[in-house]
Image (tube, rainbow, N blue to C red):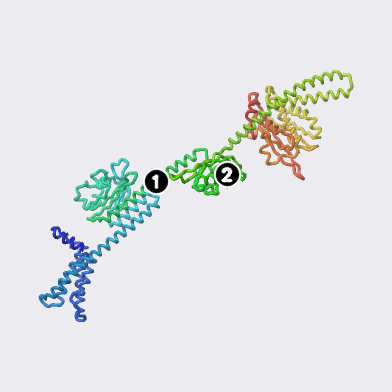
Amino acid sequence: MGTFVRGLHRLAAGKPKPIALWRPAALVRYGTAVILVVLAFAVTLWSRSVFHHGPFIFYYIPILLSAWLGGFWPGLLGTLLSAIAAVYTFTAGPPVFTPDEAMQIALFLAVGTVTATLSESLRRSEKRLRRKWRQAVAVAETGRRALVEDDLQKFLDYSTRLVAHTLRVEYCKVLQLTPEHDNFLLVAGVGWKPGTVGKAIVEAGLQSQAGYTLASGAPVVVEDDRTDTRFATSSLLSDHKVVSSLLVPIAGKEGPFGVLGVHATAAHAFTADDIAFIQSMANLLAVSILRQRGIQRLAESEARFRTLAELIPQMVWTTTADGSVDYISESWCRFTGLSMQESLGFVGWKRVLHPEDASRVLGRWNESIAKGMPYEVECRLRAANGTYAWILARGIPMRDRDGAIRKWFGTCTDIQNQRLAEEELRKAEKLAVTARMASTLAHEINNPLAAVTNLLYLLHCHTEDGDPALKGYVQAAEQELARVTHISNQMLGLYRESSRPAVIQVSEVLDQVLDLYATKIKEKRATIVKQYFCDEELVGKRGELRHLFSNLLINALEAVRDGGVIQVRTRTGCDPHMPEMKGVQVIIADNGRGIARKDRARIFEPFFTTKTEGGAGLGLWVAESIVRGYNGTIRLRSKPAQSGSGGGTVISVFLPHATASDIVQPEMLARSPALHC
């Protein structure tokens, strides 16, 4: 009925809508109405001898179908043709109507007109519902893709194809506003000539459709671009013979992105539903663009974070609110030897915790997660080489506006060197105290030693012509007193060495040390095997070398059993790390109890000893310090004695040929002790 009323309004206004019968579509629509009436007329002629019915019964079918298939005007044409056919079916010659027949014809025309109107209205409603259904499906699918598609260009290309297909138009485009806001760039579209998308430029002023749309912030409909005086002719549209257009802005919180537009090469009546559909699509494009920009900014921020995390010396990590590791820097992987995948989650990092620290660290971490307190703990982690190193782990929570923890950020700092330095400082302090005590003790001993020396001298003078046995006792006492004096001077050497470097024969110093400990060697019934294969001379300090070889010989004597064997050997050698550096190699080997494997790494540490009774743990530390002062090396090989098999230890000392200026002063050694050779 609405169509009929609109037609009457057009007739009353003197603007009847022209019927272009020459068009193929119009010929089909109106031709269908004629054919249907003819078929109804034939059926009526065939059936009137069989059925007794009114002349109009079969003519309602062509009216209904004509209106349904062709619209209101074909339905009205079918109504008129059916009325004429019905009259001439049952009359011969000119029709003569009785009042009753005239009433039937009038009623038939009215019913036919109403039927055509209702059929047309139903057809239009069905068509509109189908169009709205297609548009709703398109919006839903676009919304789904907007949430999952990570490639913005692919999403724009897909959306323009879908819009053009849904609205049954030839062209669709997305124009992006340039940073200068003076032009648009055609970034996506369908139907355009090859090479147009990605290159075509459209002005952004008010004289262009796109510029006007963006400025107005509302949809713009152009029924006929050829006659619309609001906009200047666009070369992009004229080259593609565009007639009708519909454009909507693509805007967001960060400002306008551009314009979404559709175009047709024939006059196209865009409905309110079409405008709502394309506006919905533009809104989805804006959401996707904002999402993609957010993802890009997040990726850039994450890239900066990862770069910073790899630049700093600490190992950086993040976890979820419940403590599951979701990121850890590559420095962690290099330090622990674990892969990135192995380190993520709840369990990965716990694999490298030292067993003795595990319960303490996990308890502290669980407490921090439960209470939201900052996390800080020192513990040992297994490094990639299998050794354990001390690290300082710290973590702080990141909270949202409501105060709930969203994430944990933390670092692991390698503090192994700091720990070692602290340990070295403590040892140095202990050494300083020990050295001062040794110096004080040596000074205190020297005073009575001087008195005893004088008394022995007087006693020796009074026994020159006396009892030979008494004279021998006096001489033995003088020898032991000389030995005690030498030991006292060695103790002073731990703290201060006053002698100057001189040319020294190594074998001579070794003999002096062997003579010094002749009594102890005799008590042990040890066999000394001397093998001097060289007679080299060095520039050094005699007292330091005596102290060096004394410590090594004493250790060998204490390690062997009664009747054991000690070998003392010298030969020309070179530095194992620098073969071009020549010097003297001194080897002292014994067949004693040996040193356990677990103790060898610490054998040169100060205050570390394997002796069950006595021993301050300074002998080998002092020996190593002296060797290092000569730029030499000291190495140790040992095999623990077991039941059924013997053991022993071999210590090899290499001392390079050096000048007096190359020798490090003992004061420097005392300030910077070493742990390892």
Mark seen at residue 153? none
In the displayed structure image, the side of residue 670 where residue 119 appears, left or right: left
Badge 1 density bin: few <14, some 14–19, many ≥20, Cα 10 Å? few
Q: Which residue lies under the disc numbered 2? A: 361
Q: Quadrant of the C terminus?
A: top right
- The residue positioned 66% from the left and 37% from the top of the image is 602
- Residue at the far bottom in the pictured view: 50
Nearer the camera: disc 2 or disc 1: 2
What amino acid does circle 2 point to? Val
Q: Position of residue 248 (x, y in %)?
A: 28, 50
Determine whether the residue tagged by mark 2 lies in a helix, strand or loop.
helix
Q: Where does the image place residue 386, in percent across and percent down from the top left? A: 60, 43
x then y, percent, for residue 599: 68, 39
Could you say which quadrant of the image residue 357 lies in? top right
The reply to whether residue 183 is in sight is yes
Estimate the spatial distance between the alpha carbons at disc 2 and disc 1, rounded to whole Å: 38 Å
Residue most extreme to the right = 467
Query: Answer yes or no: do the residues labelled 2 and 1 have beta carbons within 8 Å?
Result: no
Asked whether 504 or 461 is in front, the reply is: 461
* Mark 2, other Cα within 10 Å: few <14 / some 14–19 / many ≥20: many
Residue 477's spot in the image, x, y percent? 82, 24
* Residue for badge 1: 294
Q: In this rendering, is residue 36 above or below 347?
A: below
Vertical order, 355 against 135 (above or below): above
Residue type, numbered disc 1: Gly
Lower position in the chain sequence, tag 2 or tag 1: 1
